[in-house]
Image (spheres, rainbow, N blue to C red):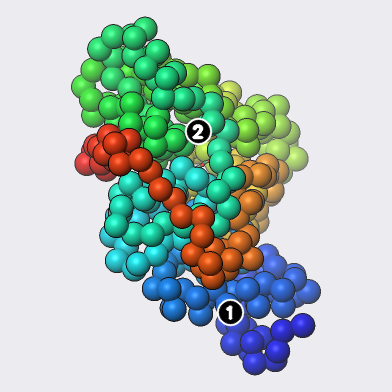
Amino acid sequence: MPATALLERTAPLYTRVQSVIPPIEWPVFAEDIDAILDLKRRRNAVILAHNYQTPEIFHCVADITGDSLALAREAMTVDADVIVLAGVHFMAETAKLLNPAKTVLIPDTRAGCSLAESITAADVRLMRARYPGVPVVTYVNSSAEVKAESDICCTSANARRVVESLGVPAVIMLPDEYLAQNVAAQTDVRIIAWAGHCEVHERFTAAEVRGLRSDHPGVTILAHPECPPEVVAEADFTGSTADMSAYVGREKPARVVLLTECSMADNVSVGHPDVTFVRPCNLCPHMKRITLPKIRHALETMTQEVTIDPAIAARARAAVERMLAV
Ligand code: 13P
Ligand code: SF4
């Protein structure tokens, strides 16, 4: 049981998350949070956390939170010595690409992504050979090696804009087939897709969405564009995790469903006590590998540093920077 002084120090943080963390769990979290806040000062470190991180990470130790696009933009301007990326490996690689002089730590190197794992650099070269001259737009949910073979990157927040910015009749869009199909539905550009899927979002079905509407009359349904197109077609709004969060803040729906990873609803609900969140969530096992004890361990030992082969990094960085310039 942590000392009373520690519980008093962390009490304001608990006030922030008490709607989503039961009191019995807090003392365990409080000890790691207190240690991490101290380590951040000693190491001159900042923690960037994705919207899918659990509330005790997202609301209690993170300095910067957001979707993949926001984390990439913020990573560029961090001037602390150390970046801890509370998210999955491709996000840590993107931070390292954009701010190579910093030490970037990922608390668990096994925090992967089914999309990133669905394609290799050799696959991209084969696609180029099959469709000569067609530019390759690669979702940031990919390895640095795959980015290095690409013309430009995109995220869920800017995919259509990036595709249309190229001014060409057709693009190859990798590796998320559903994101590619959802963008294709909004643009005249012909999209050639790859058959990668997010193991979290592919599980939502149109029948499930219809069931939610009939069980919760008047509910507003927001979907991530990694969901299958028939799910997106049933939703009221589709956007990146940051777009979904902004929608709730702007529109203040009385009752809402976020068709995305579980922790999103917890994190967004903290700032919107008047909104009821219906939670048919799916867990991302990769995001859930990141925990407070692992963040603490990474900062204590300065281990799990992300490194990228300089030759690959230069080409991958160019693809990410082209996206940020759009
Ligand atoms: P966002 O960029 O929308 O946060 O999505 C990242 C992700 O991994 C979604 O599954
Ligand atoms: Fe990858 Fe899906 Fe997990 Fe996002 S939710 S990190 S796309 S597996």
Marks 1/2 in contact by CB < 8 Å: the verdict is no
Above-or-below relation of 80 to 103 = below
| 248 left or right of 96 in image | right
Residue 231 rendering spot, x and y as whole percentages: 59, 28
Above-or-below relation of 35 to 320 = below
Of helix, strand and loop, which one carries label 1? helix
**Disc 1 designates what residue?**
34
First in residue order: circle 1 vs circle 2: 1
Above-or-below relation of 89 to 233 = below
Of helix, strand and loop, which one carries label 2? helix
Whether residue 249 is visible: no
Front one among 20 and 93: 93
The residue drawn where x is 30% and y is 49% is 98
The residue drawn where x is 32% and y is 35% is 312
| 164 left or right of 247 in image | left
The quarter holding residue 161 reads top left
